[in-house]
Image (cartoon, rainbow, N blue to C red):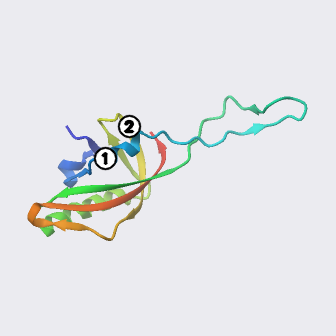
Amino acid sequence: MELLTINGLGSKQTYGFVLEEGNYKQFFQELKTKPKYAYGWNDKDGEEVDPNELTRFESVVYSFSLIFSCASFLDFNNKYDAFINVIKAPNGSIWKFTELNKTYRLHLQAVSNAVDIDIPRGKANITVQLKNNWQL
């Protein structure tokens, strides 16, 4: 079972990567809520808040390292290109963390230029920044 799927496809099986250990804890943080519309009446205490207004959240940027399994530079390049093409979609990509039971629509912010490729060990590390505008 895949721990992470992107647009319904397993990250390990489809793109050949897993999140580096410890990167999951970012996703345990609750999103900060935006202030609701409130009106402070001069002749009454406190503020009046619309109880029917939807709760909105601030966006947050996650930065994490991915570890690709690869047999060659060509293998890494193919997996990396497929992954980047999916996450750079204008409407974002759907990341589902099955172990955490959380789903997010994430938008690409940046990919590190420094890619650590160690083909003899069959690994490559990259750092990705993705912006979360809302939790699904």
The image quadrant where one finds the C terminus is top left
Q: Is residue 75 left or right of residue 57?
A: left
Kind of residue indicated by mark 1: Gly
Residue 61: image x %, image y %?
46, 54
Q: Is residue 107 left or right of residue 84?
A: right
Residue drawn 14% across and 68% down?
74
Residue of label 1: 22
Answer whether residue 36 is visible to the viewer in this image: yes
Q: Quick one: 133 or 31, which is closer to the camera?
A: 31
Which of the 4 image quadrants contains residue 111? bottom left
Residue 57: image x %, image y %?
56, 43
The image quadrant where one finds the N terminus is top left
Residue of label 2: 102
Residue projecting furthest to the right:
43
Q: Is residue 33 left or right of residue 9?
A: right
Answer whether residue 71 is visible to the viewer in this image: no
The residues bearing labels 1 and 2 have C-alpha atoms spaced at a distance of 16 Å
Ranked by sequence position, the earlier of labels 1 and 2 is 1
**Helix, strand, or loop for circle 2?**
strand
Q: Quick one: 86 or 12, which is closer to the camera?
A: 12
Which of the 4 image quadrants contains residue 44? top right
* Mark seen at residue 90: none
State yes or no: discs 1 and 2 in contact (Cβ < 8 Å).
no
